[in-house]
Image (cartoon, rainbow, N blue to C red):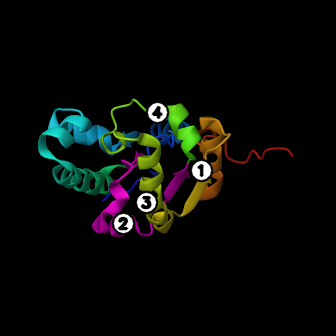
Amino acid sequence: MTAPVVVLVGPPGAGKSTVGALLADRLDVGYRDTDADIVATAGKPIAEIFIDEGEPHFRALERAAVRAALDTHPGVLALGGGAIMDDATRQLLTGRPVVFLDVELADAIKRVGLDAPRPLLAVNPRKQWRELMERRRPLYTEVARAVIATGGRTPEDVADAIVDALELRPAADAVRPAGREEQA
C-alpha cells in the first residue's frame, strides 16, 4: 500500500488543483485529483453525472475514487470538495497528512466565478457556498493535520506554508550533496 505525501481538502475555489500541482512539482512527486479520476471513470463531466444519475451516484463514484487514490497514489492528492461528507472517507483520512485549504467566499468567487459548472452552487451561489461551508468546515477541520488560510496568499505562498506545516522536504533540498551544510 502506498500513501500520499499530502492530501488536500477544501471547498470549491480553495486552490486544491493549482496548489496541488505546484506542491507536487516542488516535492518531485505526482499529482492526482479524485474529481479527474471520477470524470475518467464516468466518461463525462461531474455536472452531467449529477444531472444524469444524481448526487448519490456521484458520491458512490467519489468514495471509490478516494479509496483507490489513498491506497495507490504516493504523491499529492486533491479530493473533491464534498468528499469529506462521507463518514467512511473521513475514517480513511485519519492519521494521514491532510491539509485543509481554507478560503473565504470572496476569494473563492474570484477563483472559480459564480457561473462555473458546480452543481451544488447552481442556484444562489453565494448563499449555497455559505451554507455548504457551514456544514463542511467542521469536517474539513476534523480530518486536517494542518489548516492553511489561503486569503491574500499566492499559490506559491500556500505551497510553502504546506511544506512548513507538514515539515516536508522539497526536492531541491533532497538533492543537496551530503556533507554540505547551508551557511546561515
Determine the secondary structure under disc 4: helix
Residue 76 in the image: above or below residue 109: below
Residue 56 at least partly seen:
yes
Q: Which residues are magenta?
A: 74-102
Q: Secondary structure at mark 3?
A: helix
Give the mark toward the camera: 4 or 2. Answer: 4
> What whole-number distance in Å separates the C-alpha atoms at marks 4 and 2?
25 Å
Please give the name of the residue rendered at 54% of the width and 44% of the height, measured from the top-left corner.
Answer: 105
- The residue labelled by disc 4 is 112
Q: Position of residue 179 (x, y in %)?
A: 72, 48
Residue ID for mark 1: 162
Q: Report, in whole angstroms, how far the alpha carbon at label 4 lies from the one at label 1.
A: 22 Å
- Whether pointer 1 and pointer 3 mark residues with C-beta atoms closer than 8 Å, the reply is no
In the picture of the structure, the residue carrying the numbered disc 2 is 90
Q: Name the N-terminal-most of marks 4 and 1.
A: 4
What residue sits right under mark 3 in the picture?
Answer: 136
